[in-house]
Image: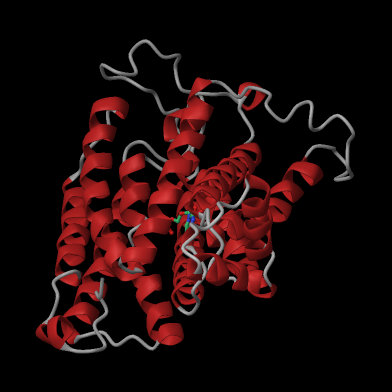
Amino acid sequence: MHYSRVSTTTSNAYSPATAVLLNELLKGCISFIIALARTPSVPLLSPALVRRSSIGMPPRPLSWWSRLCHLSAEIFSPDCFKLSIPAILYVIQNSLQFVAISNLPVASFQVAYQMKILTTAGFSVALLGKRLSKTKWLALFFLALGVGIVQISTATGNVFPSKIHEAVGSAAAAAPRLMYVMNPIKGFAAVTAACFTSGLAGVYFEMVLKNSKADLWVRNVQLSLFSIIPAILPILFSSTPGGGISHGIFRDLLKNFGAWAWATVGIQVFGGLVTAIVIKYSDNILKGFATSLSIIISFLASVALFNFQITPFFLLGSSTVLAATLMYNQPSMREKEGPHSITSP
Ligand code: C5P
């Protein structure tokens, strides 16, 4: 994602707004296909079915059309509007992510993005009534401390601000010289805002999902449907100098959309669907555990691909974040036994 943004100049950059829209459209289509495949192929306990089974006849399978009608009724159920809030928040988050990753080194972005754990915990306590042990609060304190150290190390590091970032290293050696000028203050502001939307949207989605019987994939279709309007608005209003709507914008939608841009969208789609599954089968707080792995992977990748300069400060900050994440995810005795387990499967 970082490379797809910083390897361009303003004249040949792809539109992040298009990437956000495509992400939602693709996730919506995939979720719709899965939801349709999961729609029962026989009628559920209708009087006709009971009559047929009482005289020993097998149920007559539903046609695809009936299944489609059944699924549409579920998607447009009266409570579908509940998904509008996380949908808007996720679109904002996905857009902020582009701003952040374009203005920060990958490793610094990834470490700062761990603040999601803090915001998620805060919203889980406030909205879901979850209780956190002292160890978890202590871990959150260390998390904030570690991110603070990384921020200072990035802001005072030798690659910022406004110095042209160059890709070196084996994988990026053949690529054109990177031209994008990064602005770390803007990057950190965007990543901080994205952590808030991530925490709130994730907890809200979990609340909706776990307080109703609707299928995860139906909820995902609803989420994508409500994302389309907020995702399309920036495309409509950014295309003309006066902010009005231009008629040629959809023609330019995929302008400069090369392989790196498509790869970015693909990763976002895959990540989004996996996130939905994680929220369904565990919870948002446990999701934080996986992110500790992402710090290590991003860190190694940015050293190899972007010649990232490791400073002692960066090392100290990221190790603190990593340790805090691991500490946070240690289940306490009460959570292992108690009915209010916050890591319940
Ligand atoms: O970083 P975080 O874990 O908050 O990432 C959430 C990502 O997962 C967002 O890009 C969001 O669009 C996506 N998502 C999704 N479907 C869900 C929940 C989240 O696509 N049901």
Task: Write the residue at 88% across / 36% down.
Answer: 246
Task: Write the residue at 37% across / 48% down.
Answer: 109
Farthest residue, direction top: 174
Residue 2 image point, x, y percent? 43, 35
Q: Nearer the viewer, residue 70 or 49?
A: 49
Farthest residue, direction front: 55
Find residue 18 and report its image quarter.
top right
Farthest residue, direction left: 333
Q: Nearer the viewer, residue 254 or 28?
A: 28
Q: Is residue 114 visible?
A: yes
Task: Write the residue at 61% across / 39% down.
Answer: 22
From the image, which quarter does the N terminus lie in?
Answer: top left
Residue 293 image point, x, y percent? 22, 49
Q: Nearer the viewer, residue 49 or 264?
A: 49
Q: Is residue 156 visible?
A: no
Task: Write the residue at 61% across / 27% down.
Answer: 13
Q: Nearer the viewer, residue 98 or 177?
A: 98
Residue 308 image point, x, y percent? 27, 34
In this rendering, is residue 260 above or below 19?
Answer: above
- Relative placement, left or right, of 199 versus 112 is right
**Number of callouts in the render?**
0
